[in-house]
Image (spheres, rainbow, N blue to C red):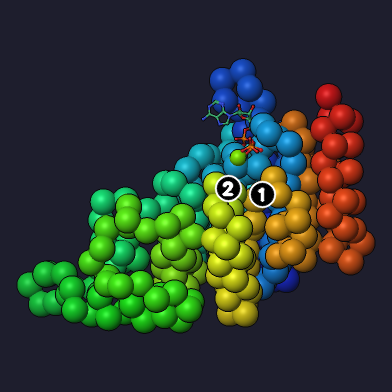
Amino acid sequence: MERENNDFLVRMVNIHKWFGRVYALRGVDFEVRRGETVGLIGDNGAGKSTLIKILSGYHHADQGEIYFEGQRVSIRSPRDARGLGIETVYQEQALAPNLSISRNIFMGREPLRRLGLIDKKVMDEESMQALANLGLKLRSPDVPVVTLSGGERQGVAIARALHFKAKLVILDEPTVALSVKEVEEVLEFIRQLQREKVSVIFITHNLYHAFDIAERFVVMARGKKMADVKKEDTSPQGLSDLVLKSAFVAE
Ligand SMILES: Nc1ncnc2c1ncn2[C@@H]1O[C@H](COP(=O)(O)OP(=O)(O)OP(=O)(O)O)[C@@H](O)[C@H]1O
Ligand SMILES: [Mg+2]
């Protein structure tokens, strides 16, 4: 295995991705340090989701390399990504709406008793504890996720990431379609990840949310990385200008 410098939790190098004739990623370099939160921003169709889906194993790059904890890795499936400690939180897909909260937290990683039966008691207790650690008090581990609010659902997905000691949590537009109060809850969940030194990639069109939560911002347009700025060198308005200018330059 190739080895390299260990400051980075993850490093994507020269990533290219085609969807048929659509050249979605055109040689993107992207990295996240240990414990760092990166805001990934850019206009519609810039390639943000495609880039992170390559990390979470939903897509494969046509060219390029991924290093995780200094090791060259091949992420062929969401299971591979989870095995490395990469958890992805999508507004919709991450949870199975008709399954209970505890089934969702353990999905595919259920504790077993002898004879291979699922240990529901352990699962329920640990689920409620994981949610409580996030400051989320839900009635029962048995209620289906479909009955929860958008903010609570994000909480369940983030509780799962924390419970299984994820090293990197990717959030693709987690605050879309949430009320102001729910957005604040979700941002608070992300702060909990930060306190636990989990690295975070946060994709959003809301540059105020991005500015609030991230330490560094990567701006994409038309499949390319156009800018990489630290929080201390910019502002929400500065980010907005960068996104607009990048979209224009990339035309
Ligand atoms: N599964 C797919 N099949 C074909 N084309 C795709 C697919 N996924 C993405 N694309 C195309 O790749 C490009 C990048 O899309 P992507 O979803 O990564 O953008 P994005 O930056 O996440 O945009 P948004 O902010 O709207 O979510 C777009 O042109 C999109 O139409
Ligand atoms: Mg997207």
The residue at which mark 2 appears reads as: 176
The residue at which mark 1 appears reads as: 204
Pinpoint residue 98: horizontal percent, then vertical percent: 26, 51
Give the residue displayed 75% in from the left and 56% down from the top: 208
Pinpoint residue 107: horizontal percent, then vertical percent: 30, 60
Three-letter code for the amino acid on which mark 2 is drawn: Val
Residue 28 lies left or right of residue 178; in this view the side is: right
Pinpoint residue 209: horizontal percent, then vertical percent: 70, 57
Give the residue displayed 42% in from the left and 52% down from the top: 94
Q: Is residue 201 above or below residue 21?
A: below
- Give 19 or 120, whichever is nearer the viewer: 120
Q: Is residue 127 above or below residue 93?
A: below
**SS for callout 1:** loop
**SS for callout 2:** loop
Q: Say if mark 2 contacts mark 1, CB within 8 Å.
A: yes
- Give 24 or 105, whichever is nearer the viewer: 105
Q: Mark 1: give few (<14), some (14-19) or many (20+) Cα within 10 Å.
A: many
| Residue 231 in view | yes
Quadrant in which the N terminus is drawn: bottom right
